[in-house]
Image (spheres, rainbow, N blue to C red):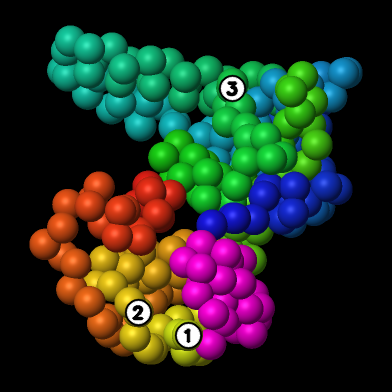
Amino acid sequence: MKHRLIDQVMNRDVVRTGPAASFKDVADLLAQHGIGGAPVVDDDDKVLGVVSETDLLLRQAAQEGAARHWFSRARRSGGARGMRAMHGVHGAQAKVRGRTARELMSAPAVTIGPRQTVTEAARTMAGRRVERLPVVDDEGRLMGIVTRSDLLSVFRRPDREIRDEIVEEVLVRTLWLAPHTIEVTVQDGVVTLTGKLQRRSEVPIAVRLAGRVDGVVSVIDRLGYQEDDSHLRPTEQALHGIAEEWLRKI
């Protein structure tokens, strides 16, 4: 399925700061615009890192007692795990002492390209535990920013729009069915597929492809079939009319 691209959901009016901005300037900037973080860019608009409220709060959170506790725990950990913990402690301590955006920021920045999908962005945010992704061009220059709320915007798509895409992209273009072969209803993002397909092996394909449409919360399967081809191997199913492209999408 064609997922929405980042350049379709990103914010192009990006609040940014320079590496020499002071702690107070950064704090004022975030408060003024009501945002949780901002990219730090150089004179060529290339992204150096991201400074966030979390980075600023380390000054309060990692006071002497807390820092001593982290240091002791890292020493007790030992080995590679201890080294990673020590690195985290030193990084936190450096930010506690930081006075400028360059010293406070998290670097290198976790970024994404404008032609990547919202699905890729969501996976990156979840995997890297970040709340925003600067969008950069091939040269690393800032083009926009995408936040969690931007990605969740796909779930605000109208039900009618979701239904039309499932009918056109899943039923007609992918499964080569007539538009009214399967009844598609959408209520609050929940899709219900009702009807009868030719083969049993087509049912999970239709359900999974419908579930991959942007904005779909879940899919209720009320599909039947005329022919049970579950005893056939995938290559034999392809010979019996199930295109290899479908099988790759499962």
**Is residue 237 toward the left or the right of residue 168 in the image?**
left
Residue displayed at 60% across by 55% down? 2
Q: SS of the residue at dot 2? A: strand
Quarter holding the N terminus is bottom right
Q: Which residues are magenta?
A: 154-180
Residue 199 in picture, x, y percent from top left: 28, 72
Q: Nearer the viewer, residue 73 or 38?
A: 38
Q: Residues within 10 Å of mark 3 (few under 14, many from 20)?
A: some
- What amino acid is labelled 1 in the image? Thr
Disc 2 and disc 1 in contact, CB within 8 angstroms: yes
Q: Residues within 10 Å of mark 1 (few under 14, many from 20)?
A: some
Q: Is residue 107 visible?
A: yes
Residue displayed at 76% across by 28% down? 137
Residue displayed at 53% across by 18% down? 94
Residue 29 in picture, x, y percent from top left: 79, 43
Q: CA distance from mark 1 to mark 3?
A: 53 Å
